[in-house]
């Protein structure tokens, strides 16, 4: 049976990195939250000046992108019926595995609290059921673990196509992986592009990740073979 896998890759989701943990604005923010920096998510809304000191700063500090994208991926019949597996690969090379029938918080602040707890505990369990699991791993590690039939990436720098054709192409295979970038600007790292068998561009515009996720998964659901 065909079971597509969705991966939000290089997601701008991470705790505050070592390089800026002594930044004045970061220290103030962590004191306000009464948490250590390693327990607090990096967020452009609160740490903008500090983030500018980081490498690839344009691609960092946007947990809201992951939040919106995961809501799109886990609030659809395809996921409810356990016909879609969902993962997040972060810019810091962490993997988040989303369990079955997980209801993620719709309120952003609650989502942040949940993910900060996940970074602290590595696993979120409810009623003896694993909802979220966090572990170290590159995108290459994840793909090797999942053993897909084909890996399809979506990027504005890819070959022009439309989402219906992308979905139909992937669904020819028993275990396709569809990858969308979880960052606001830029493109995939070169080493991650090399992991993709095909990269498609579905618009001349730079679309928000959650828009791409919603439209992609709808086409997969609609054109299920």
Image (tube, rainbow, N blue to C red):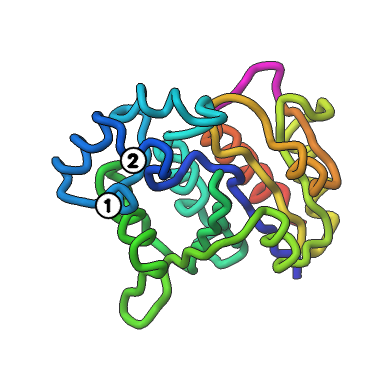
Counting from the top left corner in percent of width and height, residue 67 is at: 41, 43
Q: Which residue is mark 1?
A: 113
The residue at the point 43 percent across, 38 percent down is 19
Q: Quadrant of the N terminus?
A: bottom right
Q: Nearer the viewer, residue 113 or 5?
A: 113
Q: Residues within 10 Å of mark 2 (few under 14, many from 20)?
A: some
**Of circles 2 and 1, which is in front?**
2
Q: Is residue 204 magenta?
A: yes
Residue 124 in the figure: left or right of residue 169: left
**Residue 9 point in image, percent of width and height:** 61, 45
Q: In the rendered view, does 225 fall on the left or right side of 118? A: right
Along the polypeptide, which appears first: circle 2 or circle 1?
2
In the rendered image, residue 213 lying in the magenta stretch gets the answer no
Pick the front one: 64 or 201: 64
Q: Between 43 and 82, which is closer to the camera in this rendering? A: 43
Q: Tell me if residue 20 comes above or below residue 82 in the rendering.
A: above
Q: Which residues are magenta?
A: 203-208
Q: Which residue is mark 2?
A: 21
């Amino acid at each position: 049976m065909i079971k597509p896998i969705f991966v939000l890759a290089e997601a701008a989701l991470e705790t505050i990195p070592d390089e800026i943990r002594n930044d004045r604005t970061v220290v103030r923010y962590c004191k306000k939250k009464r948490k250590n920096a390693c327990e607090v998510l990096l967020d452009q809304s609160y740490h903008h000046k500090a983030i500018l000191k980081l490498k690839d700063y344009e691609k960092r500090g946007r947990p809201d992108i992951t939040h919106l994208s995961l809501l799109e991926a886990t609030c659809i019949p395809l996921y409810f019926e356990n016909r879609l597996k969902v993962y997040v690969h972060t810019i810091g090379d962490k993997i988040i595995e989303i369990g079955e029938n997980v209801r993620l918080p719709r309120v952003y602040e609650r989502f942040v609290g949940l993910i900060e707890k996940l970074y602290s505990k590595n696993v979120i369990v409810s009623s003896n059921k694993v909802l979220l699991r966090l572990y170290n791993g590159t995108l290459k590690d994840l793909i090797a673990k999942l053993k897909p039939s084909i890996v399809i990436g979506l990027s504005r720098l890819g070959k022009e196509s439309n989402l219906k054709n992308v979905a139909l192409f992937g669904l020819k295979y028993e275990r396709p992986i569809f990858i969308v970038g979880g960052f606001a600007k830029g493109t995939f790292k070169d080493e991650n592009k090399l992991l993709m068998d095909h990269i498609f561009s579905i618009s001349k515009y730079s679309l928000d990740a959650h828009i791409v996720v919603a439209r992609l998964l709808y086409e997969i659901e609609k054109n299920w073979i």
